[in-house]
Image (spheres, coloured by chain):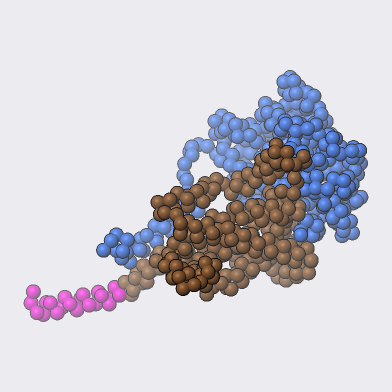
Chain colours: A brown, B blue
Amino acid sequence: MTSSAGQAEAVVRGAGAIRARPRAVLTSRLGEYAGFGPVLLLFGGFFFAPLVLIIAYSFWQVIDYNVVQNWTLDNYRYFLSVPTYVRTFIATLWMTALATVLTIGIAFPFAYWLTRYVSRSWQRPLLLLVIIPFWTSYLLRVASWITILGEGGVVNRTLEALGLIHQPLSFLLYNRWAVIFVLVYLYFPFAALTLFSALERFDWNQLKAAMDLGAPPLTAIWRIMLPQIRPGVITAVIFVFIPILGEYLTPQLVGGVDGVMIGNLVVNFFVGAQYTRGAAIALLITAIAVAMLILFRRSLVLEQVYGR
Amino acid sequence: MTLLERTMTRREALRAGLVGSVGLYIVACGGSTGGSSNAVTLNWITWNDHYMDDQLKAVHSSYQIDARVTLETDDSDGYLKIKQTKGQFDIASTDALWAPKFHSDGLTESFDISSIPASSQLYSVARDFPFWKDGSKTMGYPFGWSTIQIYYNPANVSPAPDSWHVLADSKYKGKVVAENQPTDLMAMAGLATGAKVPYGMTTDEIAKAKHFLQTCKPQFQKLVSQNSDVVKALADGSAWIGIENLGTDFRVKDAGGPTIKFVTPSEGTYGFIDCEQIVTASTNKDQFPKFINDMEQADWIAKNFIANGRPLFNEKAYKLLVDQGQKERADLLLYNKPEEALKMTLKGPSSNEQAYIDAFNEVFGA
């Protein structure tokens, strides 16, 4: 190739490169975000868009079973002005908080024991046992407690067979405590797995060092371990608290008339085609969940929870 | 460099994202393209006692018509689903005065019932329900009916109740079970408190009905989602009183429970007469007569009665039941008296549904 021919080719290549550059840049940019495609489709189409619709619905009205686009705050005003809803919200919040505390309170010692005292070869089988209930349907897991706690259930029959009672105990089901109990059972695996993941990466030598320096065990746990696994604990709280806040099925099945949570009232609105009322109250629940996420946002460093 | 550490090129990432998005789209759209090329699939929004799985299979194998069932919780649920999805459904099951509502709002259309040969098997009264007449046509193909009344365990409930007001008796605290149907329970409370039109109560009547439900609330143990839960509670003795459809006494007995009696309250009762309607926006309307004709044959209706135990409108099926030795049961469940269906307060859309649901929630909230 002569020098002039080479220069001409270089010019042609250069021109091609200039033409190709915007496309290459575009491809490059798209490539960077391509991995988000499925997530964008999923959350954009099936979460964000419905959420926008729910927000709009909450400001509309239903007239004669038709959703009418009359913009109004009536739905929100109604919930905030009727004591039943305020009471039900408060009851839901304390039930959720108590169930969360109990779940974490039971899951933490379990995760602690599993990571500290159980050999690695046994940890996996034991964790498998924790998640085995997930192999059955959620509905079945809740309904099974009716068979256990009901008047003709396993507990009552056993107590009767032992001669400890002569009439079935009716307080085991259809009240708030039954709901809380079953919720703790249902959400225990979420808390246990999250806490296990956090504790697994904790350097136990630090705990030993604290105790060597005279700290009582509980003080060592409180001042040395908990600050380091805090993101894991908070993640567990979020994984348990937020789903329970919107629970409907568990109170429906084991709560009876006395164990109603706000989710049950939302369902009644939808059953009665009062979509706008239902949307507004559902958004109030969402607002509580979002407020909680904001409250804990500083502690939500996922790398600290799950590691790299 | 391990496989996991290897950096993905942009081209690979782009391709992966594209494949993922397309995959997700296909999954979201239903994906499957399987099925017989000749078979027609009808989307049917209904209740689970309107069909049996064997029946659907038989209709499919004999007539190449598939039914894809979507269960509805209530008529209002079906109403909104059809309204919002337009032609996604072909057939809708609706109750009594809901059928005219669907029809007048353009969601369903009427048809000539005599074009369906199986209609000759129906009781004549069922072919001529006045509220379903649209000139010479009918709005729905009649299926079944039931009153809703009080079932009670005579071993625990004494004296025998004769009024809805037994629900307010504190002797039965925590011993009453009913289905969680807010509008219907409000209508029941309306009957109990003397409302003139239980599904169209005035504000004052709603207030009275709400107060009555508040008085009854301590007696309610739970509000369940399925009829079978009421049967179970009466069968295991955890509930003494249930508010249910005809046939609950038999179902409780079948479930190994005690003898349960029923009473029609002196204030009157409410209930449903249900039917199958053609959805206006359906693209398979021509298949409706054929499908209904296949589904409504007497032998299948007789089997349905045995399975679900409430009166149906197929007279030929009644005769089959008599031949099969089921006369006593059929008569006790008023199968042979379809005109009784017209004596109850018919289930229908409320004139002020929001006020009904608000009142119900205000009673049954915390």
- Determine if the magenta segment contains residue A210: no
- Number of marks in the rendered image: 0
Span colored in magenta: A1-21
Image coordinates for residue B258, horizontal then vertical, percent: 78, 32
Q: In this view of the protein, which residue sits in the foreground, A174 or A43?
A: A174
In the rendered image, the residue lying farthest to the left is: A2
Q: Nearer the viewer, residue A89 or B90?
A: A89
**Residue at horizontal 81 percent and vertical 41 percent from the top:** B241
Image quadrant occupied by the C terminus of chain A = bottom left
Q: Looking at the picture, does residue B345 appear above or below residue A119?
A: above
In the image: residue A204, left or right of residue A68: left
Give the quarter of the image for residue B16: bottom left
Residue A27 lies, in percent from the top left, at 34, 69
Q: Quadrant of the N terminus of chain A?
A: bottom left
Closest to the observer, B85 or B137: B85
Q: Residue at x 76, y 52 (%)?
A: A257
Residue A140 in the image: x percent, y percent? 60, 45
Q: In the rendered structure, does residue A16 fall within the stretch colored magenta? A: yes
Q: Position of residue B169 (x, y in %)?
A: 88, 47
- Residue at x 84%, y 53% (from the top left corner): B213
Q: Nearer the viewer, residue A83 or B43?
A: A83
Residue B107 seen in this snapshot: no
Left or right of A73? Residue B148 is right
Main secondary structure along the magenta-highlighted residues:
helix
Q: Is residue B131 above or below residue A260?
A: above
Residue for point 70% across, 70% down: A71
Q: Is residue A40 visible?
A: yes
Q: Examine the rendered structure and indicate whether residue A136 appears above or below residue A27.
A: above
